Image: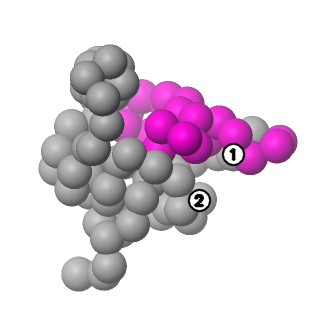
Amino acid sequence: MQEEITLDVLPLGKSAKVVNIDCNSNLINRIYDLGITQNSLIKAAFKSPFGDPIAYLVKDTLIALRKKDCKSIIVDPI
């Protein structure tokens, strides 16, 4: 087990397991709607040319999240 990090610093091509989501109720509902829940697997896929947003693969779906939102998601790299 590696050290837990926030999703925004997960290197491209790496996968992680979601440990905790710590944000307000509006954002947490959006994150849940995108399929990101505790213990789900997520993989950093692509970065936009300016580095924000970042595309992640979650449950066979590619989604984009802003870095400021990713800082609320704690993951454990695999």
Dividing the picture into quadrants, the one containing residue 21 is top left
Q: Is residue 52 magenta?
A: yes
Residue contact between numbered discs 1 and 2, judged by CB atoms under 8 Å: yes
In this view of the protein, can residue 57 be seen by the observer?
Answer: yes
Question: Does residue 67 sit above or below 5 in this rendering?
Answer: above
Question: Does residue 7 sit above or below 29 in this rendering?
Answer: below
Left or right: 75 with respect to 45?
left
Say which label, 1 or 2, has the lower sequence index: 2
Q: Residue furthest front?
A: 24
Residue at horizontal 21%, vertical 56%? 19
Q: CA distance from mark 1 to mark 2?
A: 8 Å
Residue at horizontal 52%, vertical 53%? 8
| Residue kind at label 2, given as amino acid type | Leu
Q: Tell me the quadrant of the picture where the N terminus can be found.
A: bottom left
Residue at horizontal 42%, vertical 59%? 6
Left or right: 52 with respect to 71?
right
Q: Tell me the quadrant of the picture where the C terminus can be found.
A: bottom left
In this view of the protein, can residue 34 be seen by the observer?
Answer: no
Q: Secondary structure at mark 2?
A: loop
Q: Secondary structure at mark 1?
A: strand
Mark on residue 12?
2
- How far across and how far down the image is residue 43, in percent? 44, 51
Colour scheme:
one colour
- How far across and how far down the image is residue 54, in percent? 61, 41
| Residue kind at label 1, given as amino acid type | Lys
Binning the other alpha carbons within 10 Å of mark 2 as few (below 14), some (14 to 19) or many (20 upward) gives some
Magenta residues (range): 49-70
Q: Is residue 61 magenta?
A: yes
Mark on residue 47?
1
Dividing the picture into quadrants, the one containing residue 66 is top right
